[in-house]
Image (cartoon, helix red, strand yellow):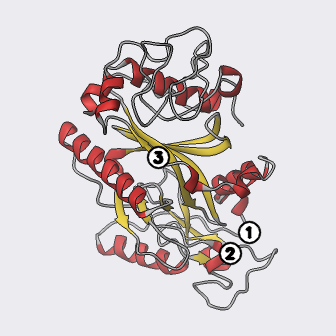
């Protein structure tokens, strides 16, 4: 089914829409042989709190970003090669339900779906894409993956010394090897973790001792480490801090976002999607056209952004079938440079 999507006009338009919604801050996504398999909102567990993120599953990469304007504009684009991805199931824990881990050599994190059914759909489609990609390329799955960071809220004191109380002045830091929340003195050294970065990264003293001993036992010289004499979290944890600032600039719109209102869309799963994937035109009118679905949805095809009428068989201007579910408005909403 993915092979049928790859060469379809519908797939090309969907990918163009995603590119437009990320704007100039995003990377080009349209390459030969790439297909958009599915998309939807998942809750990503960040270091400070859980936050909604828009995810796009392609047949070779997983893309996600911050939601600036629902279905119209995203920023902080992240691209993860699927050949590096390993999924791990998470058991429900209180209010944290329908979750799983997305693990890669450079970064690992937990995500949560709105329902158990959506969790199953996401995991099934991602695993299928990973398996197909590894078979196609002949590559072996990654054996080493980055640690999942423990959220800040789960540690009121340093997890290494068990003494330092975290305050505004005594900031939290994360060990890049084990993911523990530690104080500055207990993470005062850096170690080279090639899978994560070309530069030495902050690690806790326990992991540093373990890594250096293991390297010495293998007959290698102990690597040159960098001692952190002062709090350098502004540089070390810059990605998460930048995401926090970006979230704060959305005027708290996302605070009241309900993730259960809209289900994820996976293309090519039904006969209707298959029909749309092979159609020669998608929303091929020059004026906004109303789709024949239960709700009236505008299709601003005068720009490169395209609306898709998901669900049943839909009509877009008489003879054109639109086989997706993403509404990305016009170019005025999507085409600008994202923050």
- Of marks 3 and 1, which one's residue comes earlier in the chain? 1
- Locate the N terminus by quadrant: top left
Q: Nearer the viewer, residue 322 or 219?
A: 322
Q: Mark 2 touching mark 3, by CB under 8 A?
A: no
Residue 295, position in %: x, y? 58, 34
On the question of residue 103 being in view, the answer is no
Mark drawn on residue 230? 1
| Residue 192 horizontal side relative to residue 288, left or right | left
Residue 22, relative to residue 45: is it above or below? above
Instruction: Name the foreground residue: 180 vs 227.
Output: 180
Q: Where is residue 267 in the image (x, y as percent from the top left)?
A: 37, 36
Q: Where is residue 194 in the image (x, y as percent from the top left)?
A: 42, 55
- Percent position (x, y) of residue 293? 51, 31
Q: Is mark 1 on a helix, strand or loop?
A: loop
Determine whether 134 is above or below 301 in the image: below
Picture residue at 29% right of the left edge, 44% below the top:
129
Q: Name the residue under label 2.
A: 184
Write down the residue under mark 3.
264
């Amino acid at each position: 089914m993915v092979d049928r999507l790859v060469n379809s006009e519908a797939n090309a338009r969907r990918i163009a829409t995603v590119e437009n919604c990320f704007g100039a801050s995003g990377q080009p996504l349209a390459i030969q042989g790439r297909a958009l398999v599915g998309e939807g909102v998942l809750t990503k567990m960040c270091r400070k709190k859980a936050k909604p993120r828009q995810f796009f599953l392609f047949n070779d990469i997983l893309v996600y970003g911050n939601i600036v304007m629902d279905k119209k504009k995203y920023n902080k684009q992240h691209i993860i090669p699927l050949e590096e991805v390993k999924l791990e199931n998470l058991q429900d824990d209180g209010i944290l339900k329908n979750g799983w881990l997305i693990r890669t050599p450079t970064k690992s994190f937990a995500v949560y779906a709105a329902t158990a059914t959506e969790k199953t759909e996401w995991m099934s489609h991602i695993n299928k894409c990973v398996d197909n990609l590894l078979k196609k390329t002949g590559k072996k799955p990654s054996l080493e993956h980055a640690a999942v960071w423990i959220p800040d809220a789960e540690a009121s004191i340093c997890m290494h010394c068990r003494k330092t109380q975290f305050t505004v002045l005594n900031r939290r830091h994360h060990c890049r090897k084990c993911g523990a929340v530690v104080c500055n003195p207990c993470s005062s050294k850096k170690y080279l973790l090639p899978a994560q970065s070309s530069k030495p990264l902050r690690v806790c003293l326990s992991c540093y001792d373990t890594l250096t001993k293991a390297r010495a036992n293998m007959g290698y010289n102990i690597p040159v480490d960098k001692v952190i004499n002062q709090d350098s979290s502004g540089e070390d944890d810059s990605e998460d801090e930048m995401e926090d600032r970006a979230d704060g600039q959305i005027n708290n719109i996302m605070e009241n976002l309900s993730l259960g209102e809209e289900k994820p869309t996976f293309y090519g799963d039904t006969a209707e999607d298959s029909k749309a994937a092979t159609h020669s035109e998608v929303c091929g009118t020059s004026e906004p056209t109303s789709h024949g679905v239960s709700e009236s949805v505008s299709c601003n095809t005068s720009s490169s952004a395209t609306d898709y009428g998901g669900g049943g068989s839909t009509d877009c201007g008489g003879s054109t079938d639109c086989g997706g579910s993403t509404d990305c408005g016009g170019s005025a909403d999507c085409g600008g440079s994202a923050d």
